[in-house]
Amino acid sequence: MLRKYDWVSFQQQSFPTGAEKTKFIDEKLAQNRPVLISLSLMAYGQKGWHIMPVVDATEDQYLLLNYVEADGTLVSFWIDKSVVETVHDAHAGGKEVAFLGHLGHPTQGES
């Protein structure tokens, strides 16, 4: 059964440059706001984009959750912020960041 959580709202924003994108990601992470990034796969010889949550960060890198194995094993990788910027600037697409826009309160009976 699919559940709908009306009190949770995600927003998305596109960025003209990779530097603006990473600056925005860093600002949201500093506010403890969950962030999903879109990354063009063309830089890796593939088509399309991959949307991944940022699960940790350092001054120079992001830890991205790549996928979850069928047995529940998390597969993640570190990526330099400069690589995110370069891929953003060099390839079409992958310009967006999704972030938690509003977290209200559940209505009675929902959890």
Image: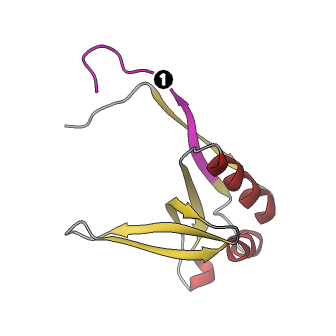
- Neighbourhood count class around disc 1 (C-alpha, 10 Å): few under 14, some 14–19, many 20 upward: few
Q: Which residue is mark 1?
A: 104
Based on the displayed image, in which of its 4 quarters is residue 75 positioned?
bottom left
Does residue 16 belong to the magenta stretch?
Answer: no
Left or right placement of residue 42 versus residue 26 in this view: left
Near-viewer residue (70 or 90):
70
Estimate the x, y position of residue 47 in percent, counting from the top left.
54, 76
Q: Residue at x 62, y 51 (%)?
A: 29
Instruction: Kindly identify the amino acid type of the residue bearing the numbered disc 1.
Output: Gly
Estimate the x, y position of residue 5 in percent, counting from the top left.
37, 29
Question: Considering the image in quadrants, where does the N terminus appear?
Answer: top left
Q: Which residues, given as a range, are shown in magenta?
A: 97-111
Question: Considering the image in quadrants, where does the C terminus appear?
Answer: top left
In this rendering, the answer to whether 107 lies above or below 90 is: above
Which element is circle 1 on? Answer: loop
Does residue 99 belong to the magenta stretch?
Answer: yes
Please say whether residue 92 is visible from this viewpoint: yes
Based on the displayed image, in which of its 4 quarters is residue 91 positioned?
bottom right
In this rendering, the answer to whether 99 lies above or below 66 is: above
Q: Residue at x 53, y 81 (%)?
A: 46
In this rendering, the answer to whether 44 lies above or below 61 is: below
Left or right placement of residue 8 versus residue 67 in this view: right
Estimate the x, y position of residue 65 in percent, counting from the top left.
45, 66
Based on the displayed image, in which of its 4 quarters is residue 82 positioned?
bottom right
Estimate the x, y position of residue 90 in percent, counting from the top left.
75, 75
